[in-house]
Amino acid sequence: MAQQPPAAESLSSSDARSGAAGRGSRPLLSVVIPVYNGTHYLPQLIESLLAQQGVLDEVIFVDDGSTDDSSAMIARLGAGLAGLHVIGQKNQGQAAARNIGMQHATGRYLAFLDADDMVDPDMYATLVGLAEAEQLDIAMGNAWNFYEGRKADTLVYRDVPDTGVITGEAWFQQRWLSRYMPHYCWMHVYRRSFIEQHRFVFPLADPHEDVVWVTETLLAARRFHFIPQALHWYRKKMILTPPPPVLAPGGSFRRHKVVEASLYNARALSEIAGRETLQPLTRKLMRREFVNGGCSVVRQIRRLSDPAQRAHYLRRIRQERFFRILWRNAAGLSQHWRVFRYHLLAYVLAMAVYFRLMRWRFLQRA
């Protein structure tokens, strides 16, 4: 059931704009932006940040080992941004970059962006004003899927009404009952004391580090409010700039980040779903989704072109008893059958890899 907002003095967007100048040294809002080789998109992002209406007074870019001129471009184009900080580090991934940015944030509220995003001029004044007026842990707006002119943009959430003030767990249930909840942290503005109280950090599970973060923060939020107003443009690029490959121990092959993130998230969500503090419906919905997603890991492994990668990850899911986790959390005959089928597929793939390796060794000796 939705909670009623507290009897508190309202802070409108115009109040937030006028208040920013009079707060002294403490920022109201800190925005953390990880960057890796972002020169193609940074001009649009920075232009949209410069157009923000007043509350944006600490902007923290974390250059995650870029090999282009990202840092120099940020310093040049972002000179007019209040509280601009540019932090450089060797490449560690987006999750690590966000965590570093959070450590430097001092604002009352905290938000995240990606380097290829764009935001509406009223985004942060609207969401911070809402959070202040209703004493929220998380304020959330809608966003556009931005296709760069290839086709018409679409809303991330279509026909989803204003929630009023509810718990984050209630929103989580609503979205998974509808079977659609993208894990986008940049749609949210967080009260920083809420983040610090629960010691939330992004897990090192790039490129799906948002999954556990969004799940954990929503389930902990006592006061959450979604508004359907689209305030953000999420760029749906045709071509992605990959970070440098990460070698497995021993340097024998490249780690596959998507597979590793999927394995990590399934185990993490299994732990979260076992918490007795959650409502039974929440546990049921979470298990349904991560069991289905966990099974898809086998398809990801099957598509790997590098035999060494395939062999490594098939061995890992066996050694870590991955399918035991999925079987234990599966619900009903259909999900148990799904887990069994994918477990069987993983076994067949492992046998194919084994016989291929034996054949290769035989030919080497001949």
Image (cartoon, rainbow, N blue to C red):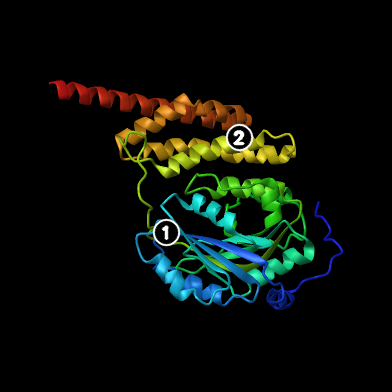
Q: Please state if 268 lies on the left or on the right of 73 as rendered.
A: right
Whether 61 is drawn above or below 266: the answer is: below
Q: Is residue 173 visible?
A: no
Helix, strand or loop under label 1: loop
Please tell me how crowded label 2 is: few (under 14), some (14-19), or many (20+) other residues with Cα within 10 Å.
many
Q: Determine which of the numbered discs, if any, sits on residue 36 in the image.
A: 1
Q: Given the current orientation, which residue lies at the most extreme right position? A: 7
- Please provide percent x and percent y for residue 224: 73, 56
Q: Is residue 204 above or below residue 342?
A: below
Does any portion of residue 262 appear in the rendered image? yes
Q: Residue at x 39, y 61 (%)?
A: 37
Mark 1 neighbour class, 10 Å CA radius: few under 14, some 14 to 19, many 20 or more: many
Sequence-earlier tag: 1 or 2: 1
Q: Name the residue type under label 1.
A: Tyr
Task: Place residue 60 in its image quadrant.
Answer: bottom right
In screen coordinates, is 318 left or right of 277? left
Name above or below for residue 166 compared with residue 302.
below
Return the x and y of residue 68 as percentages of the image width and height. Answer: 35, 63
What residue sits 73% from the left and 66% below the top? Answer: 130
Quarter of image, res 106: bottom right
Q: Position of residue 149 (x, y in %)?
A: 44, 71
**Residue at (59% x, 45% y) in the render:** 212
Residue 146 or 220: which is nearer the viewer?
Answer: 220
Q: Which mark is residue 319?
A: none
**59 relative position to 258: left or right:** right
Q: Which mark is residue 270?
A: 2
